[in-house]
Amino acid sequence: MLPEILPRGRRMKILMIGLKFMILPMWRKVLSSMKSFQLIQLRMKSLPVLI
């Protein structure tokens, strides 16, 4: 994957950056889906009041 010339710390940093870029879009999707779920729950709670 990465050359062995790089010191361990730098290699770990590169791996962490790569992981961040991989995880961030997924995390955003999860957060947005959670937000929409919360909104749905709030609407469901407010429905009996409206009726």
Image (tube, helix red, strand yellow):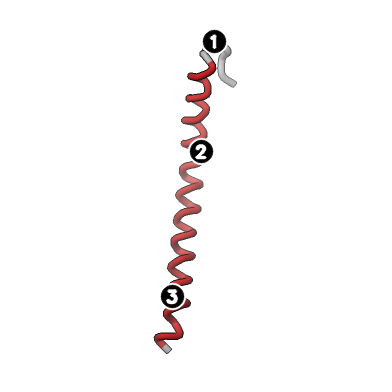
Give the quarter of the figure containing the C terminus: bottom left
Q: Residue at x 56, y 19 (%)?
A: 2
Q: Position of residue 18 (x, y in %)?
A: 50, 31
Label 2 sits on residue: 22
Q: Earlier in the sequence, mark 1 or mark 2?
A: 1
Q: Earlier in the sequence, mark 3 or mark 1?
A: 1
Q: Residue at x 46, y 70 (%)?
A: 40
* Disc 1 + disc 2, Cβ < 8 Å: no
Q: Earlier in the sequence, mark 2 or mark 3?
A: 2
* The label number, if any, that marks residue 23 in the structure image: none
Query: Which quadrant of the view contains residue 46?
Result: bottom left
Label 3 sits on residue: 43
Residue occupying the far left of the picture: 50
Mark in front: 2 vs 3: 3
Q: CA distance from mark 2 to mark 3?
A: 33 Å
Q: Nearer the viewer, residue 1 or 44?
A: 44
Total count of labels: 3
Label 1 sits on residue: 5
Where disc 1 sits, the SS reads loop
Amino acid type at mark 3: Arg
Q: Position of residue 9 (x, y in %)?
A: 50, 19
* Dot 3 alpha-carbon crowd within 10 angstroms: few under 14, some 14 to 19, many 20 or more: few
Q: CA distance from mark 1 to mark 2?
A: 25 Å
Amino acid type at mark 2: Met
Q: Position of residue 49 (x, y in %)?
A: 41, 85
Where disc 3 sits, the SS reads helix
Residue occupying the far bottom of the picture: 51
